[in-house]
Image (tube, helix red, strand yellow):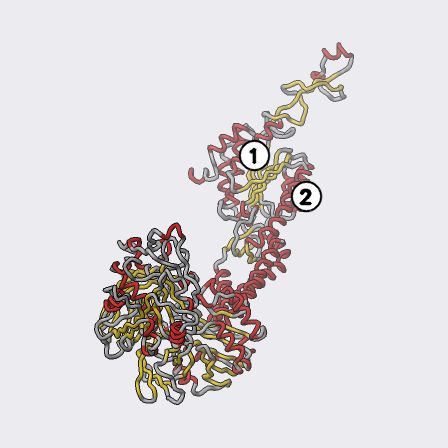
Amino acid sequence: MAADWTRYFDAKTVTLLASIGFKPGGRVEGNLVGNHRSPFHGFAVEFAGHRGYAPGDDLKHLDWKAYYKTRKYLVKQYEQETNLIAQVLVDVSESMLFEYEHGRRIDYAAFVATALSQVITAQSDRVGVALFDNQVRAMIPPTGGQEIVAKIADTLDATAKKEPTAIGKVLLLLAESFRRRGVVFIISDFFADIGSTLDGVRRLRHDRHEVVLIHLLDPLELNFQIPGRVRLLELEGPGKLDVVGAEIKDSYQTQFDAYLAEFKRRAIGLGADYIRCDLGRPFGHHLAEYLARRARQG
Amino acid sequence: MPFVHPILLSALAFLAVPFILQFLINRRKVVIRWAAYEWMRQAIVVKRKRLKVTELLKLISKLLLILALALFAARPLYRAVRASRTLLVIDTTLSMGTTLEGGQRLDKAVELALRQLREAEGAVAVAAFDGHLNPVLPMGRRHGNAEAALRNLEVAPRAATPRELLQALATAPLAAAADSIIFISDFQREQYRDRELLAEFRERLGRRRQLAFLPVDDRSGLSNLGIESCHLGPEGFWPGRANRLGVRVRNYGTQPVRGLPVTLQLEEKPSDRAMLNLEPGDAKTVWLTLPTPPAPESELRIHVTIPPDLLAADNDWYAVVAPGEPLRVLAVAERDPDDPFPRDQFLRGALAAFLPNGALAYKAVTPVELVNEELAGYDLLLTVGTRFGERDRIGEKIRAYLAGGGALLAFADPAVPTTFAGLGIPQLQPPPKAAAAEPATPDPQRLRGGYLEFMQFGDLNPTLIHFRQRAGIPVPAAEARLAVTGLAAPLMASRSGPGGGRMVLAGFLPLPGHTDFFYNPNFVLVMMQAAWEALGRDVLRGYAGDGDVAIPLAGSGAPTTLYTLRGGRGEQARAELVARGSQTAIRLPPFREAAWCSIYADQERIGGFGYNLTRQDSAVEPAQGADWAPARQAGIVVASGGGAARGAARGEALWLAMSLLLAAAGLEGYAHLWRKR
């Protein structure tokens, strides 16, 4: 069993990533005291400022020293520090089963999800995981424990991966269930309608979630390097195509680059973070670069 | 459409190869389960039309390429189809007898001609060329006797030049009726490089008429040696002596030859042999000893051989030595009662030294007695100090003798400068006064071409000979035979006599006090050369059929006499009489074989000679490669490189193949550009 639950766990990479840590871009809501600033001003530890007294306020929060100085009834405000709840959404549609020379995309996604979960739980935050294709296939409720690694592995293995993707619909659905604002990681190939996908992202952003799109692409998809004849069998459908790599390469690349550029442009336009992960590179490189950038940005 | 090698059309089966390759390539494609399917599908929609065109163009280019190669190999005969009247000319000149693949070049030429006949669709005529165009088969579509007629062709014993070929083609009616001429030959390298001549072919035969050269031999580095000629040494031929026979051998090949044996057979018995080294292109003379009995009763048959090679015709040389009657000499000299030695003493001694007993009939007379002497019976007139005036009787008699073909060897007294006035030499040239007192010696710088030339070799020293009293013979340099120091004019000269005959004149007296030449051991050899030159005898009769050769005919050559010639293979020909100077001669017909031949007057044999096939065709190296550039530039189709192909087709097939190849390359390039767009 021990061998099973660590199969998507790269301790060395996770250690490196944890040392960088994940810093949310804005305020996060949580029900536990944590490392991150809460959007709610309350009466906890750190003084945040004053506000005018309003009927109903507890008199014990009146700042009498300020009254003596200003002759105004001011109530002390404190910044509430809370913990982060992150949601990791992993696409398990059939297209995630793509595999060429760098392993299956779904396995890469699992490593990314596990690593992110570990980084987040390592800083006393909580993380939940959802697996989806055209609907939510499995959910792991937010937890701050290390058992998330094993849960991800087991859930991934237990989930059938033979349905097409419908990210937009799933995101709308999930947005309803996320009661607290947080960070939503979406790990997918995003081979779906851009408009629909981004509708879901827009909804999450509307709910003040921070959205990070992790786009997993194989080098062969980015740069069609097979010169000879290739038969392509559609992963999420019955179609098949016979092509000569050298002849179709330029045209394909034009089409695909246009899709990638548009998706990225529109996603960033919605305020989402976009990480393109080349399956030819170790996932740790991509995540480390991203986390480091966030850390620098503060 | 006819083809030279129709069997090679089977290469068209390779047209299936692109399809098979296409099938195999399609079978061997990689299968991938693809996620980004939608974008690939969109890419194909954009490219589909272009891809199909590209595929089609590529396939067409491959098919064209194979088609071109197959057609090029099979060589279609476009012009042969258009050429409704073709003349095949087979070269039968001597060089076609060169050994090739166990036979002769002519055998190969016949094979090629038969193939042309079999495959021709229009009318074909065949002619043999040996300097003249000899019809073999008339113009027609079917020749039932073609094979027999062609296989009966023989190598002719003569050579011919490309100009003769042009002349024959330009004038022969058979050629005028043809719109295509194919010449099958060995095309000797040296003969087909003349650009102007080849251009003249096109001009004179008409630019619209096709001319093709079909070589039978494309070997290189051929080895061929040949005996160019045989001749006697300058001292001539004297019965009873070991005479010298010079054999000139040439290396016509491209490789050096070491230790080539040159063998002399006398009456078919080995007599002498010498070895020779020859560089490519070199010709050298080797001297063989020709011993003859003192008084040969009849002609001696000589056969000189070198080992047989590719062209055997020039490896033998046949000749006949006809010594003729004993030499009849009349000496004319003053008699001095006080002098114990006659003035012709030393000349008579020299003649006796190189002519054995019985071979010399010698008579001495005084100038006064000469007037009454009948000179026609003498072969050589020897005079010592006799003056030949322009108007005196002696001068007149000598001139008449010379006009009848006589020979004169005359020694002048330098003190009488007008000695030879009656012989066209008005004055002898005395030495300068300052040098007159000192004796002169032969000039070593001017030995070449003279009687003392042999003394420039070995230990011989010509300056040991002294001439005290002397006078020069003022003649052109070409006639000089002995030059001495201090005298611009030669001391001895050889020239034609007034009205004919030959005379050797000397500006000194062979007497004590005048010169010590007669004490020199080489005096005899000089006298042999002088006497032989004056006599001008045609003793060695060996002729190569290189054109118009005539043999002097003994006797009158009466036109009523039927003269015949018989050759080696029993060939017989009526002799054609021709005038040769004041004598009558027989012109040689072209015999087919080198051998000893005989001359018959009516039924009586009157002499013999050696007949040798021409040497003009001995350079047997065929043209090849760049040698053909002038012919091709002149618009002549050349089927070089193998020779078995048909000349008419080669050039056209090449153009066809090149066009198809260019088309294939163009299509491939266009497809490539299309792909890039």
Chain letter, disc 1 residue: A
Which disc number belongs to residue B26? none
Disc 1 target residue: A127
* Image side of residue A130 versus residue B13, left or right: right
> Residue at point 27% right, 55% down?
B460
| Image position, residue B84 (x, y; %) | 55, 81
Residue situated furthest top in the rendering: A68
Q: Nearer the viewer, residue B60 or A261?
A: B60
Q: CA distance from mark 2 to mark 1?
A: 24 Å
| Image position, residue B511 (x, y; %) | 29, 61
| Image position, residue B516 (x, y; %) | 28, 57
> Residue at point 46% right, 63% down?
B625
Identify residue type, mark 1. Answer: Val
Tell me the element at label 1.
Answer: strand
Tell me the element at label 2.
Answer: helix
Residue situated furthest front in the rendering: B338
Can see residue B63? no
